[in-house]
């Protein structure tokens, strides 16, 4: 299966309750052979309205951080652990993200086969590598089943608490240094 086919299937997905409140499925965007994947929690209002990932305030900050690290956002595949917006911006529930990861995210990772996966924020970190304390583990590299993951703060958290911003920037640079050119 190709990434475009998977995207088409996701566009019609009704496999979990999150489908009820969505306007658009936010599959993610970026090259199908990206060396870096960034995975966040869930689409927000702007993302739901447009079908594009990380395009609100947090997305703008993410773009700046990516640029400052010497990377191009257009070279990175950006997505979330769930593809539909949870109502009221709540956190996705375990059965919802487990379903969506099994149906879509795992296949995206397999098809894109990135060198490194950056997990943005607690929800993605816990869902993918089972770690909880982001303050202690951000910037750490994890190797699980042959995949490399790094935990980073979510840009929305850095918007809310600017003191997290230097760590997020530093971790993005570390992540860049792990790519095999
Ligand atoms: S969140 Fe994922 S599993 Fe749930 S309806 Fe949307 S695409 Fe399907």
Image (cartoon, rainbow, N blue to C red):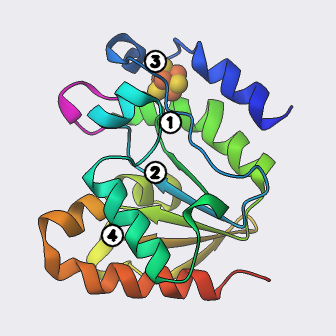
Q: Nearer the viewer, mark 4 or mark 3?
A: 4
The answer to whether the residue labelled 2 contacts the one labelled 3, judged by CB atoms less than 8 Å apart, is no
Question: On the image, numbered disc 4 is attached to which residue?
Answer: 153
Mark 3 secondary-structure assignment:
loop
Marks 2 and 4, the one that precedes in the sequence: 2
Q: Answer yes or no: is residue 60 visible.
A: yes
Residue that appears at 33% across and 34% down: 93
Figure check: 160 above or below 16: below
Question: On the image, numbered disc 2 is attached to which residue?
Answer: 127
Mark 4 secondary-structure assignment:
loop
Question: On the image, numbered disc 3 is attached to which residue?
Answer: 16
Residue 117 in the image: x percent, y percent? 60, 65
Looking at this view, is 85 or 128 the one in front? 85
Marks 1 and 3, the one that precedes in the sequence: 3
Marks 1 and 4, the one that precedes in the sequence: 1
Q: CA distance from mark 2 to mark 4?
A: 15 Å
Residue 139 in the image: x percent, y percent? 44, 83
Q: How many marks?
A: 4
**Disc sitting over residue 18 in the figure:** none
Q: Is residue 119 magenta?
A: no
Q: CA distance from mark 1 to mark 4?
A: 21 Å
Figure check: 54 above or below 96: below
Marks 4 and 3, the one that precedes in the sequence: 3
* Residue 77, picture quadrant: bottom right
Residue occupying the far right of the picture: 1
Residue that appears at 64% across and 30% down: 103
Q: CA distance from mark 1 to mark 3?
A: 10 Å
Residue that appears at 40% across and 88% down: 170
Q: How dense is the environment of label 3, judged by Cα within 10 Å: few (below 14), some, or many (20 and up)?
A: some
């Amino acid at each position: 299966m190709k990434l475009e086919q998977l995207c088409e299937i996701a566009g019609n997905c009704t496999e979990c309750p999150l489908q009820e409140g969505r306007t658009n499925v936010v599959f993610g965007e970026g090259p199908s052979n990206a060396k870096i994947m960034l995975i966040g929690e869930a689409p927000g209002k702007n993302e739901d309205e447009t079908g594009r990932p990380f395009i609100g305030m947090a997305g703008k900050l993410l773009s700046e951080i990516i640029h400052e690290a010497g990377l191009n956002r257009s070279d990175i595949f950006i997505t979330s652990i769930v593809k539909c917006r949870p109502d009221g911006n709540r956190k996705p529930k375990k059965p919802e993200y487990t379903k969506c990861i099994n149906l879509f995210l795992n296949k995206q990772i397999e098809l894109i086969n990135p060198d490194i996966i950056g997990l943005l924020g607690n929800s993605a970190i816990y869902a993918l590598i089972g770690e909880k304390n982001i303050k202690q583990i951000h910037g750490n590299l994890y190797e699980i089943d042959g995949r490399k993951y790094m935990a980073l703060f979510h840009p929305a958290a850095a918007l809310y608490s600017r003191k997290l911003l230097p760590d997020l920037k530093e971790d993005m640079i570390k992540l860049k240094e792990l790519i095999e050119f």
